[in-house]
Image: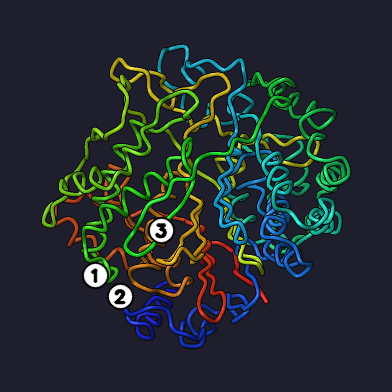
Amino acid sequence: MQIRRFLLAAVAVLGVGGGAYAQTTSQLAPAPEAATGRSVRDHGVSTRYMAAAANPLATEAGREMLRAGGSAVDAAIAVQLVLNLVEPQSSGIGGGAFMVHWDEARRTLTTLDGRETAPAAAAPDRFMGADGKPMKFYDAVVGGRSVGVPGTPRLLAEAHKRWGKLPWPQLFEPAIRLAENGFAVSPRLSGLLGQEKFLSANPAARALFYDADGKPLAVGTTLKNPAFAQTLRTLAEKGVEAYYAGPIAEDIVATVKGHPTNPGDMTLADLASYAVKEREPVCGAYRAYRICGMGPPSSGAVAVQQMLGVLETRDMGRLKPGPEAAHWFAEAGRLAFADRNLYLGDPGFVSVPVEGLIDPAYVRSRAALASPDRSMGTAKPGEPPMRKTLLLGPSDGVEHGTSHISIVDAQLNAVSMTTTIEDGFGSRLMTKGGFLLNNELTDFNFAPVADGKPVANRVEPGKRPRSSMAPTIVFDAFGRLYAVTGSPGGSQIINFVGKTLVGLLDWKLDPQVAVDLPNMGSRNGPTELEAGTEAEAWKPALEAKGHEVKLLEMTSGIQAIVLTPSGFVGGADSRREGVAIGD
């Protein structure tokens, strides 16, 4: 198997748990051609700058901006716009995003919240059926009911205002070219269209993604999207306000309200009032490193910090990937998800005790609950310090979809941005403007009350649903930029990012090897191991410790860039189609 061959080759060359990165990139990694079939260029070694994203066409757009002297933000915007076109199932201007930005000259870290919001008319029982029970997931997803007010366009504009160097219209050029001239449908897009059950019911989507016989477009078919090209031209020429007011906004509202069986209630006023929020970064120490990410309404950074805090009580560097490491990783996940499900939500609506949840002493007390010999099964939430009186019920929530972008520019400014329309193909609603709308509101808990108490992640007007997105930037012991990473994958994102950080920081793996490691973890339920990888062999040893083990498809999409003394080394998850490239 590809992942297994790459891992074993890397272990042989690097030595799992070995010393720091080698001084030269030739020493750093095994020959990528032999291990993965990728070229060296695709594998990701550069000296000037680097972009990593889930599709080669999108990554090339980012590099085009970097070559033109653009900033990391310029590149990220170009990448996002092309991803909307070539990977429409995962992200786009009809969705939301979180961005973590490092400004090297000013030595400042900023996190921007472009998460979607619930319309003003949204009520806590939005996803409760007439029988008083939560709706079935896809009954809620498909249609306008699930669509939140999109935040990605305004996030891109805000980031460009702060850190962009190139003219705004220039960032749209790669996506406009591809939309007008066409691009070859990738295996992943064609395959997902073949599995999709709901999208073809939307006339605009059917006309774009299916042939005259109603079959999904085959691999290699040239796909053009002139409607999206026109939308991009409008935004390039008139700015982001043309999205939130005027014909594009009117089309969004009409699409949301016009679904025949499951209409939504978004209004033009909802769109006009959308605002990006700057949040306080969530940062914490892990061994000699400082790990920083996105705070609430994302639970990602808090949960990752808690997991790493538990793992820090173990000598993870001594352990190689295997059942022992998976045991501790799963126990750490149980503890983190127990707290996540009780405390995390939109901080504008609930008091989230972030400082208490990542307090080192509190996390160590949680770590003491984990045994080396036996799984705890299901963890209970703790009582972190600095929390106000809470009368909340636990919630789970459902998450899917998403994409991730990692960029470092020539000045060592960095962007880690996770971007989403939630489920694959979102709400299955495509506007006349050629882009899909999100189903982000189904990230809220469907039942507003649990155990007789309101849940933190219940639906409320203007509220942002809890997320697990975990865009992450890592600094070394001297405060220097060290790594940029993140992943899609719904609530599994937390485990995907945690795994990658352990691979990079404890096991000193090449970024490509770290992102391709078998996925593992627990979301305070069964211990989950990635099917079709060497992790399957860990199942008996974990079961002997009392784990209930499930083998799952775990299609992460991790992108990672690491700074070395000789330049940049990047990795893009082999489970998807991405590359990490630079010059």
Residue 417 % position (x, y): 58, 51
Residue 277, relative to residue 51: is it above or below?
above
Question: Which residue bears the numbered disc 1?
Answer: 319
The N terminus lies in quadrant: bottom left
Residue 267 % position (x, y): 71, 20
Image side of residue 539 versus residue 282, left or right: left
Q: Which residue is drawn at 50% across and 26% down?
A: 348
| Element carrying mark 3 | strand
Image side of residue 72 versus residue 474, left or right: right
Question: Which residue bears the numbered disc 2?
Answer: 17
| Mark 3 or 1: the one toward you | 3
Circle 3: residue type: Arg
The reply to whether discs 3 and 2 touch (Cβ–Cβ < 8 Å) is: no
Residue 548 % position (x, y): 21, 49
Nearer the N terminus, badge 3 or badge 2? 2
Along the line of sight, which residue is nearer the eye, 265 or 382?
A: 382
| Element carrying mark 2 | loop
Nearer the N terminus, badge 2 or badge 1? 2
Residue 214 % position (x, y): 71, 45
Nearer the N terminus, badge 3 or badge 1? 3
Residue 290: assigned label: 3
| Element carrying mark 1 | loop
- Between the C-alphas of marks 3 and 2, the distance is 19 Å
The reply to whether discs 2 and 1 touch (Cβ–Cβ < 8 Å) is: yes
> Is disc 3 surrounded by few (<14), some (14 to 19) or many (20+) residues within 10 Å?
some
- Between the C-alphas of marks 2 and 1, the distance is 7 Å
| Mark 3 or 2: the one toward you | 3
